Amino acid sequence: MIRSARRWLSLVTISAMIAVGCSSDSETPDPDTSDASTDDGATAPGDPADATYKLALFSDPTTDNPWAALDTEADIWTSYVMPGQGSLYTYQGPSYTLVPLLAADIDPPQPSAEGDGFSVVVNLRPDVTWSDGSPKTAHDLVFTFDTVVKYDGLGGNFPSVWPLARPDDPTTEEDEFSQGVSAVEALDDTTVKIVFNFDPGLAIWPFSVGLAPIFQKAYWAPVVDASPDAETLYAASGMGSPNGSAFNTVEREEGAFWRNETVSDYWDAGSRFRVFESGAVEYTPASGESETWGGEPDGDTLTDYTEGPYISEMLYSVYTDQNTAVLALTENEVDFILNPLGLQSGLRNEVLAASDLEVIVNEEAGFRYLAFNTRKFPMSELAFRQALACRIDKEFMTDTVLGGSAISSDSLVPPGQAFWHNPDITAPCAGQSEQERLESAVDALKEAGWTWDVEPVWDEANLDVIPKGEGLRGPNGEEMEPLTLLAPGPGYDPMRATYSLFIEEWATDLGIPISAEPTGFSVITDRVFTGDPLAWDMYILGWSVTPFPDHVFRFFVSSADSAQGGFNTPGYSNPEFDELAERFDTVKTLEEARDMVRQGDAIIARDLPYLVLFNTPLIEAYSSRLSFPFTEVLGGLQAFDGLGGVVQIN
């Protein structure tokens, strides 16, 4: 199956209304019918040809342990290469329809009251197996949940997909109560009951717990039993551990390559998938009767293919930067570049000049952003964040400096998610001239009690800030220490590296002593996600996000502070936002969820723990010897890790 349910540092989607079989007012592009057929190859699914699918990375995966890969120890490069564990439900490309995977129930069962809480009983398919051929059962779900409980919820993605129910401790003044899963029980091998301490809304069931990864009990239970803490568990090698995909990891050389080998008896090989414009999916297993998922089939066929794999292995080579990876592509050393940034504009001509390469363009499923560490002065001051955001002219950056290769963005939800996107959010000082931006920024600081020894002034004759600000002090007379802005280096992403230099200049105009520090991607992620939460000031990174945009809350709710292993790197804390996030977990309809997502998005745009900067058209290039069942999809082919399970090599 083309089933990638990545929710993490990796990947977004078209409207989640499709995911539950409803209609949407957003347009779906016409399918490329030349990609719809997979009947022209001689290789039978489940009988892989002796062919290697060669892919390029330009950052080294950080771990081979799938538990660690779901925590903040990993990044998108690790998620690209790590075989998936599988879940009850998943997303079907290219429509991102929510469909059953291990679950036998086509529609996720509705929660029903049970005692002081609520529960769902999910029937499981008996024919789903792990990559080692053993059956995947309800006992694996129980083990996975019990492991998360043992380590007090773990971190990173785990609190989002396996939120734990927590009672309030009456002996403390704090309210420790949290909504979540209180138990997972195996009623038999193919029936599982999930118990919640509240009536869960869509955000929790099915769009979190229904997509939660499942780990094999037989392999991992001895490791967990021998691991007194999560760090010990994460230190264990996961090389060759059973998983839920069509591939096993068999070899890795750090800094050089990663190799996944095909599972010859993959359980779903030979199944047929037909995806319609309405989002409906017609599924016909290799042996069995057809089922229809996600509503009534209607409209054109987006894709019609038979599940593979059609290859013998996937070989991921690590390159130093995008330039060397593109060179490898043009010289036929690799077939496809996995790249969350898309192809840089300066390299497009090289690719377009190569007659044996194909180029596709899709909407990006994510955004680049500037983050402020709100735990420390001056980033803790809203006026500081507003003033700096006001000075940043995003349209000038995208249209002039970046030459139109990027698109200014203001919302945490990309425009491609038309149902969820908030079109009313605008950037601070949008539409103002550079002079007006400076004056607005100065006014914002002065109104909040900030002072200068030398106040910055716009010089109309020179069209510049003369004099620049000097001796800027906070409302209580606090002097500012030099600040550092971390950003990926030019070899990794010249756009963000360039952006950081302009932010440094704009800040200097105001008298803010910021120094841009382009550095390694992994250096930044290590520092802001797992290091000392006070050891950084600001950084620029990016997210790829998921079909159901709960990231609007998961990235900023105070309980997800990265100091406690979550994704709230700014340390943002706002009771109004936390209350909205708690209510979001209970809403039952997509319309209610959309309204709350837009409210949450607007609060973040106002309070600015993040300033969303831009996104880009996602340009991907691949060898013409590859055939894919579809190429038009939000987030590109990399949102499905390069479609290794169904790619055919001619």
Image (cartoon, rainbow, N blue to C red):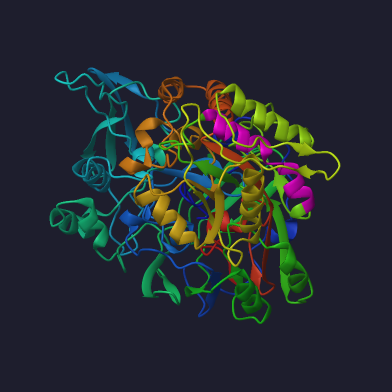
Residue 472 in the image: state x and y as whole percent. 56, 37
User: Is residue 441 highlighted in magenta?
Assistant: no
Q: Residue at x 18, y 51 (%)?
A: 229
User: Picture quarter containing residue 120?
Assistant: top left
Residue 295 visible? The answer is: no
Name, please, the residue furthest toward the right.
461
From the viewer's perspective, tell me whether residue 247 is left or right of residue 183.
right
Q: Residue at x 45, y 60 (%)?
A: 522
Tell me which secondary structure the magenta stretch mostly adopts.
helix
Residue 173 visible? The answer is: yes
| Residue nearest the observer in this picture, 203 or 504 | 504
Residue 197 in the image: state x and y as whole percent. 28, 24
User: Picture quarter containing residue 603?
Assistant: top right
From the viewer's perspective, tell me whether residue 497 is left or right of residue 220.
right
Q: Is residue 499 above or below residue 569?
A: below
Tell me where the magenta segment starts and ends, as one range.
382-400
Could you tell me which quadrant the C terminus lies in?
A: bottom right
User: Is residue 396 highlighted in magenta?
Assistant: yes
Q: Is residue 251 above or below residue 67?
A: below
Q: Residue at x 84, y 39 (%)?
A: 460
Q: Is residue 547 above or below residue 260?
A: above
Residue 601 in the image: state x and y as whole percent. 56, 29
| Residue nearest the observer in this picture, 171 or 96 | 171
| Residue nearest the observer in this picture, 421 or 504 | 504
Residue 221 in the image: state x and y as whole percent. 18, 55
Q: Is residue 388 above or below residue 201?
A: below
User: Picture quarter containing residue 294?
Assistant: top right
